[in-house]
Image: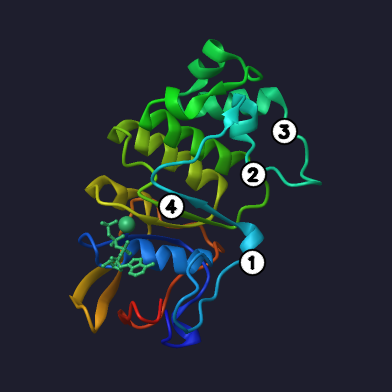
Amino acid sequence: MCGQSAQDAITGQSLLIEGPSGSGKSSLLRAIAGLCHRGFGAIHRAPIERCFFLPQTPYLCIGSLRDNVLYPARAGDAEVSSEQIRTTMRNLGIEHLIDRHGLDERLDFQGMLSGGEKQRLSFARLLLHPGVHLALLDEATSALDEENEAVAYNQLRENVHCYVSVGHRPALANCHSLRLQLRRLDDSLGCQGTVSSINLESPHREGSPQLFQGSPQHQLSQHQL
Ligand SMILES: Nc1ncnc2c1ncn2[C@@H]1O[C@H](COP(=O)(O)OP(=O)(O)OP(=O)(O)O)[C@@H](O)[C@H]1O
Ligand SMILES: [Mg+2]
């Protein structure tokens, strides 16, 4: 994957990255997202404009719900209707925010919304963002209860074929097809990772792009990230 060989980094599927605190999960995700410029090696993924990164704590701006849910809108993006926004937010269980604040009232949502509401708003951003091929989620549902987490991942699975998550909850395995277990070796050697399949009741769709494949053992050096 990182500095190994091109064959280790393939397109596709859904990957859950697990490991103890400090084992390098976020560093790996940031490297895949192109947010980490240290080190060397090759990472093969969809073009950056087709990737969408969801942090654990989403950034909300002072502005309307519409401004926040359509962030980061790009010039030339197709217009997203109020109905599309409402449907997406309803599917994620946060339609009440529109009922409460409307779509166009400017407010400080950063200081107002609960952690779980912010994370679901962040999911709405992802789902309303056009042309996402690869979603990268760093503990993006950590503030949600398991039911709402499953709802969010079902929405994700229906809309984005390929995603990589960092997470701790055992139930997250149900939402992914592959697992990467990272473990820290020591400060000088970085971490080691093992990739394995997760057997889901409904196997991944035929023709879905593949994300990772190759040998089951990947040596990941944080110096290379
Ligand atoms: N920019 C950086 N410069 C130096 N060291 C860093 C940097 N970013 C991360 N690290 C170190 O790399 C190691 C892995 O950090 P990382 O944030 O990837 O861990 P993690 O597995 O995501 O942990 P957690 O579960 O606590 O979020 C840590 O020891 C961290 O201090
Ligand atoms: Mg982390």
Q: Amino acid at mark 4?
A: Leu
CB atoms of marks 4 and 1 within 8 Å: no
Q: Secondary structure at mark 2?
A: loop
Residue 171 in the image: state x and y as whole percent.
26, 45
Q: CA distance from mark 1 to mark 3?
A: 23 Å
Position of 100 compared to 153: left or right? Answer: right
Q: Which mark is residue 47?
A: 1
Q: CA distance from mark 4 to mark 1?
A: 17 Å
Q: Which residue is mark 3?
A: 80
Reading the chain from its start, which is encountered first: label 1 or label 2? 1
* Neighbour tally class for label 2: few under 14, some 14-19, many 20 plus, Cα within 10 Å: few
Q: Secondary structure at mark 4?
A: strand
Position of 205 compared to 191: left or right? Answer: right
Q: Which mark is residue 137?
A: 4
Q: Amino acid at mark 2?
A: Pro
Q: Which residue is pictured at 25% across the width and 51% down the height?
A: 168
Q: Amino acid at mark 1?
A: Pro
Reading the chain from its start, which is encountered first: label 4 or label 2? 2
Mark 1 against mark 2, which lies toward the viewer?
A: 2
Q: Which residue is pictured at 69% across the width and 23% down the height?
A: 82
Reading the chain from its start, which is encountered first: label 3 or label 2? 2
Q: Tell me if residue 42 comes above or below residue 158 in the rendering.
A: below
Q: Which residue is mark 2?
A: 72
Could you tell me if residue 178 is visible in this image?
no
Q: CA distance from mark 1 to mark 2?
A: 17 Å
Q: Tell me if residue 82 comes above or below residue 21 in the rendering.
A: above
Give the number of marks: 4
> The C terminus appears in which quarter of the rendering?
bottom left
Mark 3 against mark 2, which lies toward the viewer?
A: 2
Mark 4 against mark 2, which lies toward the viewer?
A: 2
